[in-house]
Image: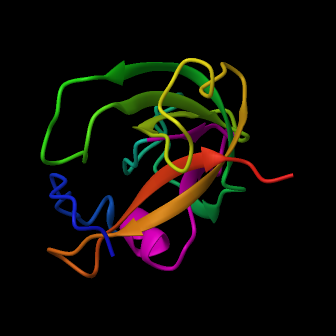
Amino acid sequence: MSEIQRPLPKPTPETQHFWDGCKEGELRLQRCSKCAETWFPPRPFCPSCACREVEVYKASGKATLLSYVISHRGHPGFGKEPYAIAVVELEEGVKMMSNIVDCPQTPEALVLDMPLEVTFEQQARDENIFIPLFKPAEG
């Protein structure tokens, strides 16, 4: 369980499936039943065709590193500096902003297009909240 004091999300009816999935170790996305568009963040309708027939499904959890910045300025919500703030592209084609963990926070270690996999961090202030983070893929 993390001792870092991250800002915690407040699940809403539209996002509850996502946070429930994180608690169960699953990264859940939404897909349109009409046009098959996948998106993130969660919303009750398709951003492409506005259809409200939405399917929730388990994503692979695999991603690649698209972009990042290394912050050398401490913040109680993100641990000791430096830490990477990254944009990752999931195998399903959507992009997420997250942190990269379990590797040095240096340009030499954080290589663009490197394969990543999701991991979940339980929050000490609310044991029902698990934050999705990404780490270098094993293998």
Q: Vertical placement of 38 versus 54: above or below?
A: above
Left or right? Give the position of 136 relative to 105.
right
Q: Residue at x 47, y 51 (%)?
A: 133
Q: Tell me if residue 54 can be seen.
A: no
Of residues 35 and 120, which is closer to you in this image? 120
Q: Position of residue 62 (x, y in %)?
A: 71, 48
Apparent side of residue 134 relative to residue 15 in the rendered image (left or right): right
- 85 or 62: nearer the viewer: 85
- Residue 94: image x %, image y %? 59, 34
Question: Which residue is pictured at 59% across the width and 26% down the height?
Answer: 110
Q: 8 left or right of 128?
A: left
In the image, residue 44 sits, relative to residue 88, either above or below, namely: below
Reply yes or no: does residue 55 show up in magenta.
Answer: no
Q: Examine the rendered structure and indicate whether residue 1 appears above or below residue 101.
A: below
Which residue does the image show at 55% across and 73% down from the upper left?
25
* Quadrant containing the N terminus in the rendered view: bottom left
Q: Please give the range of residues in magenta.
A: 17-40
Instruction: Say which quarter of the image contains residue 86.
Output: top left
Q: Residue furthest right?
A: 139
Residue in view at x 62 percent, y 20 percent = 108
Q: Position of residue 76 (x, y in %)?
A: 12, 47
Which of 15 and 19 lies nearest the eye of the viewer?
19
**Residue 17 x, y percent position in the rendering:** 42, 69
Residue 15 picture quarter: bottom left
